Image (tube, rainbow, N blue to C red):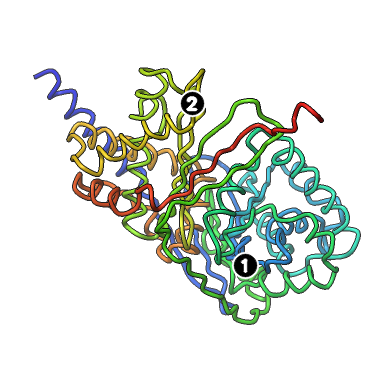
Amino acid sequence: MKNAIMALGSALLLSGGATAQKVAFEEYNLDNGMHVILHNDNTAPTVITSVMYHVGSKDEQPNRTGFAHFFEHLLFEGTENIKRGEWFKIVTSNGGVNNANTSDDRTYYFEVFPSNSLELGLWMESERLMHPVINQIGVDTQNEVVKEEKRLRVDNQPYGNLIAEVKKNMFTNHPYRWATIGSMEHLDASKLEEFQAFNKKFYVPNNAVLVVAGDLGDIKKTKEWIQKYFGTIPRGADIKRQTFTEDPITTPRTAEYQDPNIQIPMVIAAYRTPSMKTRDARVLDMISTYLSDGNSSKLYKKIVDDKKMALQMGAVGFNQEDYGMYILYGMPQGSNTSAQILKEADEEIVKIQTDLISEKDLTKLKNKFENQYVNANSSIEGVAENLASFYLLYGDVNLINTEIDIYRSITREEIRDVARKYLNPNQRLVLDYIPSKDKGQN
């Protein structure tokens, strides 16, 4: 009886949390094609102004990689009305913070201000879009910044090239095959006119969504400011996007990469998965959590805790607009080999493909996803980015409220069937990520 009462209490708590997290929003289009989403939340006197552009590394040319990420830096250089070097000073002097990030699919910029600086935030983002200054000094400056970032985060970081090596071997035709940070040689070879052309093509209002969230105060005034600062920006040319498809992986792929920054080898098993917009992608999220998310996951408990064959077992899920990846990794311990721990992992995958997971494990999984759902929308920053992503990449803003229902509806049978469909040895890349053999000679 006690357990039943506790279970009921947990269910009510989760249900109440999910209901409390329902995100109210209003959306509309400006005449120039920019989509606008407003979310009013006066629980704190802060506001976020954010713009997400539908441009990422997959929109680059194969001989000019790194442009999307480069612009994440370049567009803080200044505008016609914000002098070079003044952007961050304006933000901090008004009690705000700002940042940006880039993925294979999109680029995202935002400022968080006290709510009485809402108009300032809108003006700054409109300046970035309408009046950017893209000149040689800015390009040269940010080129050095990006090179230093690559040195710190990739070249000199243990296992820093792991994702890039997986992508290179998983994709043959799709632009996902190159790293988001791109090639420094490509950036060095690019002319100023190429950066200006990239901006003209992708940084247009009809390729963007503006999200304003937080303590908006007078909604009518907010809309007036949006029209004033963004409504007058000319519409850009419609973007003709290429569609890239990959043939299914039907025979095992193998690769090796030598990293001079590591001493312990790592084995990676990577599976190509479908678009994040599909139901199968959500089922794979659950499978990934079940197998390899945290110290209580099946693989960690078996291979690290019980058998002590590995120092670490885990996974990275890459959910993307066109294709995704499930990247399983392990670090063998002692005399155990990469092949041995991969064999142990395969046995656990076969169990999912053969038998239904228990009802208890399914309930535990769903509780985890309920918790993730609540946490994802627990801050204004999280809500703003989710609203932008669900509009721009999924085509349905209300998924911010309803995607959790998809996870709630996933069955044990679906988990078994999707594991059978995607997680087979003939459908994967096995990458041996090892210490450099020449390390001792350097």
Q: Earlier in the sequence, mark 1 or mark 2?
A: 1
Quarter of the figure that contains the C terminus: top right
Quarter of the figure that contains the N terminus: top left
100 w.r.t. 360: above or below: below
- Lateral position of residue 331 relative to residue 201, left or right: left
Quarter of the image for residue 184 reads bottom right
What residue is shown at x 47% (from left), y 43% (from top)?
327
Question: Which element type, helix, strand or loop, lies under badge 1?
Answer: helix
In the depicted view, which residue is nearer to us: 408 or 144? 144
Kindly identify which residue carries mark 2: 312
Q: Nearer the viewer, mark 1 or mark 2?
A: 2
What residue is shown at x 42% (from left), y 21% (from top)?
304
404 w.r.t. 5: above or below: below
Q: Which numbered disc covers residue 353? A: none
Q: In the image, residue 162 lies at what x, y percent?
A: 60, 42
Quarter of the image for residue 66 reads bottom right
Kindly indicate whether the residue at mark 2 contacts the one at mark 1 (C-beta within 8 angstroms). Answer: no
- Lateral position of residue 405 relative to residue 383, left or right: left
- Lateral position of residue 102 relative to residue 353, left or right: right
Q: In the image, residue 154 lies at what x, y percent?
A: 70, 41
Question: Which element type, helix, strand or loop, lies under badge 2?
Answer: strand
Q: How many marks?
A: 2
In the depicted view, which residue is nearer to us: 189 or 379? 189
Q: Amino acid at mark 2?
A: Gln
In the depicted view, which residue is nearer to us: 316 or 169? 169
Kindly identify which residue carries mark 1: 59
Q: Amino acid at mark 1?
A: Asp
What residue is shown at x 38% (from left), y 47% (from top)?
425
100 w.r.t. 174: above or below: above
For the residues labelled 1 and 2, the Cα–Cα distance comes to 35 Å
Q: In the image, residue 14 lies at what x, y percent?
A: 27, 36
